[in-house]
């Protein structure tokens, strides 16, 4: 984004008034984390997206997609994401094992909601397999579709799709890249520990 | 393009906010510019999802700013022009954009210009727009746009000397 010639008081005032008048459909913030810069986006209903940036994914691309899929009334409003940011910080520092965050699941299709709903129940520090998740949601032949739904998870980390691996212990895939999946599983001490 | 996807509003704000504020500085003076700017951007954000023509988002914002400036003029009385020595060269000179924190006397003098000259000067120097673009907005020829801008700058030089 280009620099604007606007001082921070002017920006701050606009941000606050826009929120007070209910004109911000999507509030976003970025945060640094051990797995790179994260874009966090929330609607009135809750956290709608966490996007990994870097490795060719730019914040702007993620915002374009939100503009298309949710609403173009998108403003940077870090204060609104503060509770999520602090919980994520605690998680990345090893001081938190689950999240208390309201989620907006509108970027998940019906099948993905079933898959990701099941995934949310895999506890910190353990892993499940694509086949197990498929079985749990009553679609035992759909392991591949489960993988696709996990790869497109709009709220990674908090919806812990990194905890789903291949039968036999291979990591499988990850929407944010395998390095990140590995890092998260190491953080949780979960390598090789199937549920 | 008509009907193209709308970019995130934050991007409009970042890319065009500075120009909108500079334009308002000229149109209503520094004292009221920030309020007008807030009103402009809130109106824009309110209307944004229904915007169909995305080909000139800056022009769209400036149109809203212009309406807000007219409202502000109606609401309050204009300050009398206080012409003094000033840094016209620094503010308007050498083709650069007018800086928002230029001497208020410059803005007062700009407001005193005849309407066509004022519009041409503001669009050229505060808005950094091409003569072709200005000619389009004012529905005049490109030569006339250039003449109006130059005449405006000459008047400013004379007044502020």
Image (cartoon, coloured by chain):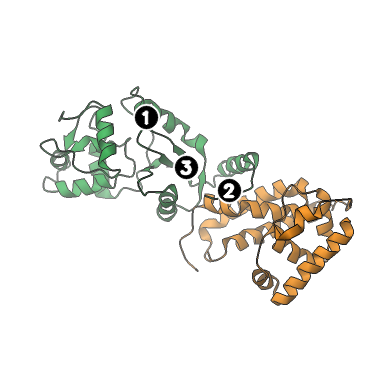
Chain colours: A green, B orange
Q: Residue A74 at x, y = what percent?
A: 49, 48
Q: Chain of mark 3?
A: A
Task: Find disc 1 in the rendering and name its residue.
Answer: A100
Q: Chain of mark 2?
A: A
Same subunit, tags 1 and 2: yes
Q: Which mark is residue A28?
A: 3
How packed is label 2: few (under 14 Cα within 10 Å), some, or many (20 or more)? Answer: few
Same subunit, tags 2 and 3: yes
The secondary element bearing badge 3 is classed as strand
Question: Is residue B160 at least partly visible in the picture?
Answer: yes
Q: Residue A17 at x, y = what percent?
A: 61, 42
Q: CA distance from mark 2 to mark 3?
A: 18 Å
* For discs 1 and 3, the disc positioned in front in the rendered view: 3
Task: Find disc 2 in the rendering and name its residue.
Answer: A3
Q: CA distance from mark 1 to mark 3?
A: 18 Å
Q: Residue B103 at x, y = what percent?
A: 80, 48
Horizontal side of residue A40 vs B102, given as left or right: left
How packed is label 1: few (under 14 Cα within 10 Å), some, or many (20 or more)? Answer: few
The secondary element bearing badge 1 is classed as loop
Name the outermost residue toward the front. Answer: B94
State the residue at coordinates (26%, 46%).
Answer: A151
Whether residues under marks 1 and 2 lie with C-beta atoms below 8 angstroms apart, the answer is no
Horizontal side of residue B15 vs B153, given as left or right: left
Question: Is residue B140 at least partly visible in the picture?
Answer: no
Q: CA distance from mark 1 to mark 2?
A: 35 Å
**Quarter-wise, where is residue A43 in the image?**
top left
* For discs 2 and 3, the disc positioned in front in the rendered view: 2
Placement of B128 over or under A141, stated as above or below: below
**Quarter-wise, where is residue A36 in the image?**
top left
**Quarter-wise, where is residue A16 in the image?**
top right
* For discs 1 and 2, the disc positioned in front in the rendered view: 2
State the residue at coordinates (51%, 34%).
Answer: A79
């Amino acid at each position: 984004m280009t620099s604007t010639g606007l001082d921070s008081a002017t920006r701050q005032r606009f941000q606050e008034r826009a929120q007070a008048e209910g004109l911000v459909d999507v509030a976003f913030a970025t945060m640094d984390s051990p797995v790179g810069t994260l874009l966090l986006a929330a609607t009135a209903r809750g956290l709608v997206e966490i996007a990994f940036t870097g490795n060719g994914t730019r914040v702007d691309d993620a915002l374009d997609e939100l503009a298309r899929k949710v609403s173009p009334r998108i403003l940077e409003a870090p204060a609104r994401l503060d509770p999520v940011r602090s919980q994520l910080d605690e998680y990345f520092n090893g001081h938190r094992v689950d999240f208390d965050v309201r989620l907006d699941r509108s970027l998940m299709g019906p099948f993905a909601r079933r898959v990701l709903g099941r995934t949310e129940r895999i506890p910190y520090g353990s892993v499940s397999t694509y086949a197990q998740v498929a079985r749990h949601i009553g679609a035992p032949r759909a392991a591949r579709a489960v993988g696709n739904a996990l790869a497109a998870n709009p709220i990674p980390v908090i919806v812990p799709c990194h905890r789903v691996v291949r039968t036999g212990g291979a990591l499988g895939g990850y929407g944010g890249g395998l390095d990140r999946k590995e890092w998260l599983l190491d953080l949780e001490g979960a390598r090789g520990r199937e549920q | 393009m008509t009907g193209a996807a709308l970019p995130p509003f934050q991007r409009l704000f970042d890319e065009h906010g500075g120009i909108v504020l500079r334009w308002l500085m000229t149109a209503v003076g520094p004292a009221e510019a920030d309020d007008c700017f807030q009103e402009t951007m809130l109106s824009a954000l309110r209307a944004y999802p229904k915007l169909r023509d995305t080909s000139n988002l800056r022009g769209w914002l400036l149109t809203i700013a212009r309406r807000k400036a007219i409202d502000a003029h109606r609401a309050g009385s204009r300050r009398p022009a206080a012409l003094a020595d000033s840094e016209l060269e620094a503010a308007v000179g050498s083709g650069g954009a007018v800086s928002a924190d230029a001497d208020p006397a410059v803005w007062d003098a700009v407001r005193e210009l005849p309407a066509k000259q004022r519009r041409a000067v503001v669009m050229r120097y505060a808005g950094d727009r091409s003569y072709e673009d200005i000619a389009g907005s004012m529905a005049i020829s490109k030569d006339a746009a250039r003449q109006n801008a130059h005449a405006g700058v000459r008047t400013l030089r004379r007044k502020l000397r």
